[in-house]
Structure formats: structure tokens, C-alpha cells
Amino acid sequence: MAENKEYYVQEVTDGSIQISEDVVASIAATAVLEVEGVCGLSSNLGADLAEILGRKSLGKGVRITPAENEALVIDCNIVVQFGQPIFDLAKAVQDAVKTSVESVTGLTVHQVNVNISGIAITKDAKK
């Protein structure tokens, strides 16, 4: 994410509530990682698995972009376990991210794009 962080503002009767872009990305990342079959997040489409495992920031594989009408577009770069049905897994990630971000922040999610950037093969699957 850029050095100048975006804040999403909601006006309420007693003032305003500001939610950092990093907070939204962390919520989305947590939702992604809770989906069975997802091994991790990737910072970009070309990242390898060793780089993913050393991640310090939870939201590195998630990009948030403002859309029309104050809605959000969320891009998630993920690594999946070998043998998982990819389209079903991607749909589960979309649903989990949209539900989690909307329920926790109150913001509207217009679109969740899931990019499968790698497949992790477990030791058992190699045999």
C-alpha cells in the first residue's frame, strides 16, 4: 500500500469514524486465511511460497481500491493447497471477504477479485 494511507470516513451524529485502509486489508486477509484450502497470501502474482511464509504484515496480499458510490473493490492474491477445487475455493474466498469486511466495518464491498498466484503441494501429496 502507498505511503499516503487512505482512510474511509463515516459521518455519525457525534463526529466521524475513520477506518484505515490497512485495517480493511487486515480484515480481508483474515477472512481469506480462514477459508479451508487457502495456504496463504501472496504480495504479487509472481511471489514464491518461501516469501509468503515470511510475511510480517497480514494485509500484504490484499489491495483495496475505492469504487463508485463509496464502495470498495478488493483484490486478493492467494496460494491454494494442491487438490482443492479452485473455482469453488475462489467463490468461498469472495463470500468470506465480502461478508467479513461489510459486517466489521459497515463499508460496502462492490467486488472481490481472487487471483490464484500459486499452488502449495504438501509432503503427503508428493508421495
Image (cartoon, helix red, strand yellow):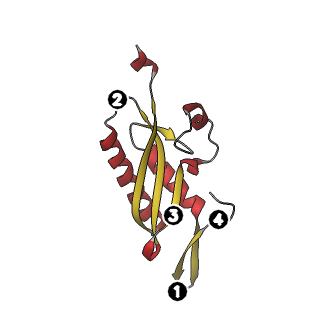
Q: Which residue is mark 3?
A: 65
Left or right: where 64 falls relative to 68 = right
* Structural crowding at the residue carrying mark 3, measured as other residues with C-alpha within 10 Å and reported as few (<14), some (14–19) or many (≥20): few
What residue sits 53% from the left and 42% below the top?
42
The CA distance from mark 4 to mark 2 is: 38 Å
| Image quadrant where one finds the C terminus | top left
Badge 3 marks a residue whose secondary structure is: strand
| Residue ID at (31%, 43%) | 87
- Toward the top, the furthest residue is 127
Q: Nearer the viewer, mark 3 or mark 4?
A: 3
Residue at 53% from the left image edge and 81% from the top image edge: 11
Residue at point 47% right, 50% down? 76
Secondary structure of residue under mark 1 = loop
Q: Is residue 10 above or below residue 102?
A: below
- Can you tell which mark lies on residue 83? 2
Q: Amino acid at mark 2?
A: Gly
**How busy is the neighbourhood of tag 1: few (under 14 within 10 Å), some, or many (20 plus)?**
few
Q: State the image coordinates of residue 97 (x, y, percent, origin top left).
A: 42, 55
Task: Mark 3 and mark 2 in contact? Answer it, CB < 8 Å.
Answer: no
Left or right of 97 in this view: 61: right
Q: CA distance from mark 3 to mark 4?
A: 12 Å
Reading the image, the residue beneath label 1 is: 13
The quarter in which the N terminus is drawn is bottom right
Task: Tell which tag, 1 or 2, sits nearer the viewer.
Answer: 2
Q: Earlier in the sequence, mark 1 or mark 3?
A: 1
Q: Identify which amino acid the numbered label 4 is placed on.
A: Lys
Sooner in the amino-acid sequence: mark 1 or mark 2: 1
Question: What is the three-letter code of the residue carrying label 3?
Answer: Thr
